[in-house]
Every structure is written in C-alpha cells, then in structure tokens.
C-alpha cells in the first residue's frame, strides 16, 4: 500500500521538479555553455565508440572461445600483445591528450572568469527572479 502511494506521487514529483527554470542543457545560449556541451557530447560519442569496440572484441572472443589462436595470424601471442599495448596504452594516451588540448586550449578561453578590468565594467542586475549582466 505504501509503495502504491509512492508510485502515485512519482509523476507529481517529476512534474514539479521541471517547473520554474529556463535552463536547458540541450540548448546552450552562451559560448561557454556551448563549449562545455560540445565537450560533453564528444566525450559521450567517444566513450560509446570505445564501449562498442570493447563489446565487439568480447563478443568475438566469446564466439571463438573453443578455438585456439587468431584466424589469419601466424603468431597470435605477439598479435595479442600488440593489441593490448595499442588499445591499452597508446589509444588512451591519444584520447586523454586530445581531451586535454581541446579543453585547455580551445575551451578554457571561453569558460574562464572575466579579468578584473572586465569584471569592474560588468554589473549584475536582478529582475523577476532572473539575473542579467550589463556592460
């Protein structure tokens, strides 16, 4: 009975939690928000691709679990070591480096706080529960 009441209140809680805000994570309005959203989507796509590759490798290993060796490869131990080193060391270094360069070189300028001179010329006006910057 108690669970039924809680489940009945769930749609009301979801409806009430979405009221009163104009913020939208899927529709950024500032350059900083757009940059962060772009970084987030790139990371999501990259992690989905990485997950897909790992899942394909696991599926292939499961399908061939009773057979020895790798098809069309003479030295399967050396090939396996190359796969582990490339996908376990080289690819993560390249991905982390790319994320570092994108976020610190291209994105950092957009999301940095304003300089002291720019902050002095900017005032914050509050009206109707919303904040607006004036220059």
Image: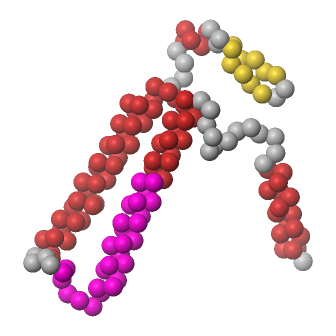
Instruction: Quadrant for residue 132, please give it.
Output: top right
Q: Is residue 89 above or below residue 117?
A: below
User: Is 115 placed left or right of 75 in the picture?
Assistant: right
Q: In this view, does 98 lie above or below 80?
A: above
User: Is 89 placed left or right of 106 in the picture?
Assistant: left
Q: Which residue is drawn at 62% across and 45% down?
A: 26
Q: Foreground: 35 or 17?
A: 35
Q: Residue 41 in the image: x percent, y percent?
A: 50, 48
Q: Is the magenta stretch mostly helix, strand or loop?
A: helix
User: Is 75 placed left or right of 122 in the picture?
Assistant: left
Q: Which residue is drawn at 87% across and 68% down?
A: 8
What is the quadrant of the C terminus in the image?
A: top right
Q: Which residue is drawn at 81% across and 40% down?
A: 20
Q: Residue 55 in the image: x percent, y percent?
A: 39, 71
Q: Which residue is drawn at 79% across and 50% down?
A: 17
Q: What stretch is highlighted in magenta?
A: 45-71
User: Is 128 placed left or right of 70 in the picture?
Assistant: right
């Amino acid at each position: 009975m108690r669970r039924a009441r809680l489940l009945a209140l769930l749609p009301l809680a979801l409806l009430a939690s979405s009221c009163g805000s104009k913020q939208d994570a899927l529709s950024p309005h500032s350059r900083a928000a757009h940059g962060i959203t772009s970084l987030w989507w790139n990371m999501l796509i990259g992690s989905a691709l990485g997950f897909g590759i790992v899942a394909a490798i696991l599926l292939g290993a499961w399908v061939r679990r009773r057979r020895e060796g790798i098809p069309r490869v003479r030295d399967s131990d050396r090939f396996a070591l190359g796969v582990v080193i490339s996908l376990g060391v080289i690819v993560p270094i390249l991905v982390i480096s790319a994320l570092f360069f994108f976020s610190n070189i291209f994105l950092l300028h957009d999301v940095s706080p304003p300089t002291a001179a720019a902050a002095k010329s900017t005032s914050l006006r509050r009206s109707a529960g919303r904040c607006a910057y004036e220059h």
